[in-house]
Image: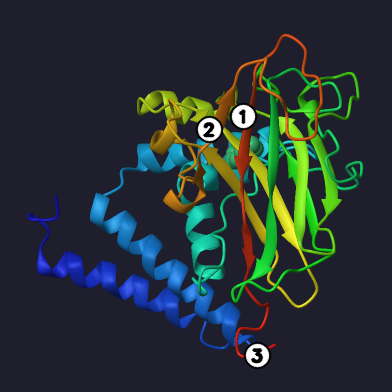
Amino acid sequence: MTDDITPEQVEREQQLTQTVLRSFDQAADPRLREILQSLTAHLHAFIRDTRLTEEEWNAGIAFLTDVGHTTTDWRQEFVLLSDVLGASMQVIGVNNAAYGDATEATVFGPFFVDDAPVIDHGGDMAFGAAGEPCWVSGSVTDISGRPLPGARIEVWEADDEGLYDVQYDDGRTAARAHLFADEAGQYRFWGLTPTPYPIPDDGPVGRMLRAVGRSPMRASHLHFMVTAPGYRRLVTHIFVRGDEIGWKDSVFGVKESLIKDFLRHDSGDVTPDGRDVGQRGWSEVRFDIVMAPSDPHHVR
Ligand code: BEZ
Ligand code: FE
């Protein structure tokens, strides 16, 4: 597309980029200078590479304006845009460098709520949310296998209608809780077998996905956020092996290491804690969580 641009035109375009880059040279904060200069360089390269038309620029501004208007105190359409562009996962990757066998991180999503109820070991985080019961258990350790008793584990997920509690307008709290790893660094609780659901797609981001023939569906998952003093906060999910959406996840959150086997049981099978799940089947999954130190240079 750039074949028929004269050297004089190229020179003019490069001149403008250089002038804008230099306009940041005096910024007192060197990090701010670096970020704005890099952003300018990439933005100008994008405009020049695509030979962006004024009509397209206007459409882009209108789209971003709509993203802004859709954003409220409880709906963050800019983060959703970042998610479907894979930008959120790139930021997560850059900031959660691989460290031994530390569990990989993935997207946070918009449905975490502070102050979710606490549950005991073996408690039920569903709080009445609809879905198939799932026994979730595992350990929290450092990369050498040392248990981390007291690690705080937050869990949240959608019900089998594909909705989080906060998406209902009756103020319910369900399918979310927190618990603490026991003295041996073990944890166990009842949740729901995850099912696929769409990201909120009734706004500009949804329109963009439809325009390019992409699905809004997320692979079935259960969210975790794990914290322990001296360790890097871990925000992650576990995904269901064999899930129908799988790698086509709309926000690129799936990682091989986070895909787990959810073992399916008939209603007649005895549950690990003897709970009677009635006529329903149930499932179980194990997730051993490995925490990276917050300062990888400081040997604990
Ligand atoms: C979620 O998993 O809850 C989610 C993540 C990114 C965008 C929308 C939803
Ligand atoms: Fe989710």
The residue under label 1 is 194
Can see residue 73? yes
**Among numbered discs 2 and 3, the one appearing first in the sequence:** 2
Q: Residue at x 69, y 40 (%)?
A: 136
- The quadrant where ligand 2 appears is top right
The residue under label 2 is 205
Q: Split into 4 quadrants, where in the image is the C terminus?
A: bottom right
**Among numbered discs 3 and 1, the one appearing first in the sequence:** 1
Q: Residue at x 42, y 23 (%)?
A: 210
Q: Nearer the viewer, residue 28 or 89?
A: 89
- Closer mark to the observer between disc 2 and disc 3: 3
The x and y percentages for residue 126 are 80, 29
Left or right of 228, for residue 212:
left
**Residue 248 lies in what quarter of the image?**
top left
Circles 3 and 1: CB atoms closer than 8 Å: no
- Identify the amino acid type marked 2: Val
The x and y percentages for residue 283 are 62, 28
Give the spatial CA distance, label 3 vs label 1. 37 Å
Q: Is mark 1 within 8 Å of ligand 2?
A: no
The x and y percentages for residue 42 are 38, 65
Give the spatial CA distance, label 2 vs label 1. 24 Å
> Is 46 situated above or below 212?
below
Q: Is disc 2 placed on a helix, strand or loop?
A: helix
Q: Nearer the viewer, residue 196 or 272?
A: 272
- Identify the amino acid type marked 1: Pro
Can see residue 77? no
Q: Residue at x 91, y 25 (%)?
A: 171
